[in-house]
Image (cartoon, rainbow, N blue to C red):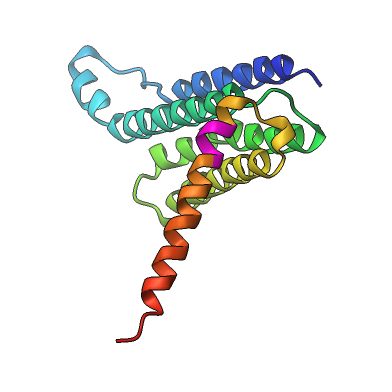
Amino acid sequence: MNKSRLEAFSDGVFAIAITILVLNITIQDVSYADLPAALLGLVPKITSYVMSFILIGLYWIGHHFYFERIKQVDGNFVLMNIVLLMLISFMPFPTFLLGKYPLGPLPLTLYGCTLIATNAVSFVMLVYIYKNQHLANEHFKNEFYKLDRKSTRLNSSHSSVSRMPS
C-alpha cells in the first residue's frame, strides 16, 4: 500500500472522529428564561468534548509525527494503523458516556481503558518502525537511533556505578 493513501485515509478517520464528538452536545427545547440552567447542565458534556477533542488532536499530531519519519509502510504497519484508527473512531462513545455520567466509575474506566489501548498501539507502532529500519527515513534514524545509543551508554554507566563497592 502507498504511504500517502494510508495517511489520507487516517486523516479522514481522525477528522470524522473529532467531528462526531460535537454531536453529543445538544440542548433541550427550553424557554429563553430556562436557557442559562440548560446551558449549565451541558458543562459535563462540553468538558468531555473539549478533553477528547484535545486528546484526539494530540493523537493526530503523533500520527503525523510517525508518518513524517517513515518512507514506506508494510502490511503489519497498516494493520497496526487500522487498530489505532478503530480506537480513535471509538473515542466518541466513551466521551458521550463521560458527558452523561461524569462521575460514574464505568464511563471513567471505559474512557481510561480506551486511552491506554490507544497509547499502547501508538507505542507498538513506534517500536515497530524502530525495529524495522527499512521503513524509516533518515529523519527517524537520526533522531531515534542516536537516542538509543545515548540511553545505552547511560544505562551501562549507571550499572557500572551501581556495581561499585561501597
- The foreground one among 138 and 73 is 138
- The foreground one among 43 and 53 is 53
Kindly identify the residue that appears in the image at 46 percent across and 53 percent down: 151
Give the magenta-colored segment's residue range.
141-145
Residue 150, position in %: x, y?
46, 49
Residue 157, position in %: x, y?
41, 64
Kindly identify the residue that appears in the image at 57 percent across and 19 percent down: 16
Q: Is residue 165 above or below residue 131?
A: below
> To which quarter of the image does residue 78 belong?
top right
**The magenta stretch spans residue 58:** no
In the rendered image, the quadrant that contains the N terminus is: top right
- The foreground one among 37 and 166 is 166
Residue 25, position in %: x, y?
40, 24
Magenta segment, prevailing SS (helix, strand or loop): helix
Kindly identify the residue that appears in the image at 72 percent across and 19 percent down: 3
In the rendered image, the quadrant that contains the C terminus is: bottom left
Kindly identify the residue that appears in the image at 34 percent across and 50 percent down: 103
> To which quarter of the image does residue 155 belong?
bottom left
